[in-house]
Amino acid sequence: MFSPENLDKFETLVALIARLRGPGGCPWDREQDHESLREALLEECYEVLGALDEGDIQRLAEELGDLLMQIVFHAQIASEAGEFQMRDVLQKINRKLLNRHPHVFGSAKVKDAGEALDNWEILKKKEKGEGASLLENVPEKLPALSYSQEIQDRAARTGFDWENIEGIIDKLAEEVGELKGAENQRKKEHEFGDLLFTLVNIARWLGVDSESALRRANRRFYQRFSHMEAVCRKRGVNLADLSFDEQNKLWEEAKRKV
C-alpha cells in the first residue's frame, strides 16, 4: 500500500492517515480532534492562496496536497467517532455538483457563466429553504475583506447594486468626507468601516479580489521596506536616524528595484 508506485493514489493518503491515527501510530496525530486542527486547516488554506499569489505552480501542487491531508484527517476523526466517513464527504459533493449543474447533466440551458452562477444560487436557496437569507451561509470566519466582497456580490445578484462604477466612486468621496468629519473614536471606526466597505465594492466592480489585492500590496511593502533596510546596512546608516525625506528617497529607490 505504501510502496512508491502507490503514492499517487487517493486511497494511499486515506490509509496513511488511518495508520498514523491507529494503534502504534504517531502520538501527536492520535491526540488531534476537529477542534485542535482548526488553525492548521486555516493555515493550509492561506498557504494555498500564497502559492496562487506568487504564481508558483509547483508550490501550489504541494500546498493543495497539505490541504487535502487536512480534509482526510477530519474525515478519519469523524469515521472513528461514528460521525461520517470519507465516502459521505465524496457523496455529498458529487451530488451537489450534479444537482447544481443541470445545464451540464440535465436539459437546462444557460447563455453564459453569469447565468450559470445565478442558477447555482437559485438551486442552493431551494436546498436551504425559502426562509433562508441569501447571505446566511457565507462563513463569518472569512477574512473581513473576503466576507464583505462575497455578501456584496450575492446582494448584487438580486439587482441590489449600483448602475455604474461612477456612482460608487462618488460614494467613496462621500465616505472620505464623513471620515474627516468624525468627531470621536467610535464615529471614526464607523466611518472607516464604511470607507473600506465602499472600496471593496469598487474592487468587485473592477473584477479585483480585494483580499488578494491587499495581500499582494502587503507583500510589495514587505519586499521594498526590507530592501530599504538592506541598503541602510550596506551604507552603514540607521534607517530610523534618516529624515522623512531621506527615507522617501530610499523608498522610491526600492520601488524601482522591487
Image (cartoon, grey):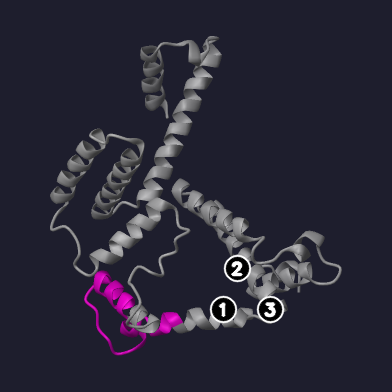
Distance of label 1 from label 2 (alpha carbons) = 9 Å
Q: Is residue 163 left or right of residue 100?
A: left
Q: Assess disc 3: are there few (<14), some (14-19) or many (≥20) residues with their C-alpha within 10 Å of its C-alpha.
A: some
Label at residue 89: 1
Q: Amino acid at mark 2?
A: Ile
Q: Is residue 84 left or right of residue 249?
A: right
Dominant SS of magenta comes to helix
Q: Quadrant of the N terminus?
A: bottom right
Q: Which residues are magenta?
A: 96-122
State the residue position of label 3. Answer: 79
All told, the count of numbered labels is 3
First reached walking from the N terminus: tag 2 or tag 3 = 2
Q: Amino acid at mark 1?
A: Val
- Mark 1 secondary-structure assignment: helix
Q: Residue furthest right?
A: 24
Pointers 1 and 2 in contact (CB under 8 A)?
Answer: yes
Label at residue 71: 2
